[in-house]
Amino acid sequence: MGEIPLRVRRKVWLRQFLLQGCWNYEGMQNLGFAYSILPALRDRYEGRPEELSRALKRHLEYFNTHPAMATVILGAAIRLEESVAEGKADPRAIGTFKVGLMGSLGAIGDSYFWGALKPMASAAGAIMAFVHPLLGIVTLLALYNISHLTLRFQGFAAGMGGEESAVRFLKEAGINRRTEDRKMIAAILSGAYAGVVSSQAAHMFGGAWPELGVFLIAALAVHLFTVLFRKAVSPSEVLFLLLIVGVLILWQ
Amino acid sequence: MLWEFLLAAVFGGICYLDRTAAFQVMLHRPLVVASVVGAIFGNLAAGAQVGAVLELLYIVRLPVGASIPPDDTGAAVFGGAAAATASSSIGLDPGNFTAILLLSVLCAEFGKVADRFVRRMNGRIAHLTVDMLEKGDSLAVEHGLMAGITLFGVFGMVLTLFFSGLGVSMAGFLLTRFGPESHIQFAAMLPLVPLLGAASVFSCSRTDRTSPVFYLTMGCVFAAMFFFRWLV
């Protein structure tokens, strides 16, 4: 049996965008993973419906990782399924591989995408929106998706190269370094944003000393909010408090 | 107005799909959603003004594992519709701007509850899929996933209709009842909300190296703007 044809790989690649299509509390991304890998399984187990059904059940077990990093596991799982279909590997190896990698990939992905790339893109978008709303939107979408789509594609290609290729990709992609860099840029951009906001607020008072006072209050407010966030206070709770203060002001 | 709501519902459905079920290409971010909803209801700039602030507010709440962050897409739908309706030819009044930002938190929390409900319903779909597969129906996986996506999309459309309706009615009836004095008092709280957003991004990116950089950049930008105003 030869390699999985390109059209099947393309189908799997497109389907992986729907990985969280039926996200649920028990299996999390299980149904999405089974859906994504299905074209490859159909190709491997053509004319063997019982084996296809068994393979699908394997992929309906609990699965959860960062959606953009799942492509690495998906590609490698296809390679493992090829070996299983040819009788060269134990089907249990697939489950072990998925469970072994999903936790660490989830942590890496969450830290990079949600903790560094998204804040960076959002802060850049919010700043550019001061110039023009459309420029803000384009900046946000471009900054996020160039890295996001590239990593999804590279991860899938690396996974399709097999387990070793997947692990090599994770080492060579330098995601930890990228995370640190994006966090630094996000800190600079959010600092600039806070500077613009505090400057606008200070402008209402006029005079050097009052303006400096407003700046110090703004820096103190940011520091207080970050301390609250570290103590697991949600932004919603802070906004609720401000809303109550606002209602009390109106009540007067 | 009917066409506006229909258009917003279709767009909202796509954005809610992007939020969890499909693609995750950031179409669901508040800056995008509030700007487009604002444009649908007649004022892109006012929508973007609200969206840019909402964009940063909830960044600190990461969608990790089973935790669901507040629904900033819903908050942006509400904010975009309300801002476009409440704005005049000179833009959005600071008092209304503050009120819209603060009231949007109710939508964000309501949307979070709705999201949790949809995910529980998806659990039933997943169970049914496994049962069907046991009976030998391999198409069940595709049907199950499509059912999940449809559920996410329909809920997104319904939430968008609800939030945009709420935004338009609030801007039309509630905000107009406040006097100009209360507007000024209310607007005094306005800088706190974007600062909360900046703190949210900073908390995400906080390391030993980034802390001094954040405050240094904040000071430099403030000083540069002060100097520029002094020159002019």
Image (cartoon, coloured by chain):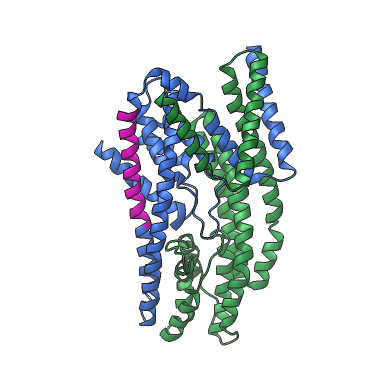
Chain colours: A green, B blue
**Residue pictured at 45% horizontal, 73% vertical:** A38
In-image side of B51 versus A149 (left or right): left
Q: Relative to residue B206, is residue B64 depicted above or below?
A: below
Residue A242 locus on image (x, y percent): 49, 34
Q: Where are the magenta residues, as a range?
A: B152-174
In the rendered image, the residue lying farthest to the front is: A252
**Residue pictured at 62% horizontal, 34% vertical:** A222
In the rendered image, the residue lying farthest to the left is: B2
In depth, the one of A127 and B192 nearer the eye is B192
Residue B79 locus on image (x, y percent): 41, 36
Residue B165: image quadrant is top left
Residue B102 locus on image (x, y percent): 45, 35
Query: Which quadrant does the C terminus of chain A fall into?
Result: top left
Residue A4 locus on image (x, y percent): 52, 74
**Residue pictured at 54% horizontal, 45% vertical:** A234
Residue A159: image quadrant is bottom right
Q: Main secondary structure of the magenta part?
A: helix
Q: Relative to residue B92, is residue B39 depicted above or below?
A: below
Question: Can residue B101 be seen here?
Answer: yes
Question: Can residue B15 be seen here?
Answer: no
Please tell me whether residue B37 belongs to the stretch shown in magenta: no
In depth, the one of A23 and B101 nearer the eye is B101
Q: Relative to residue B10, is residue A46 depicted above or below?
A: below
In the rendered image, the residue lying farthest to the bottom is: A87
In depth, the one of B187 and B51 nearer the eye is B187
Residue B101: image quadrant is top left
In depth, the one of A208 and B13 nearer the eye is A208
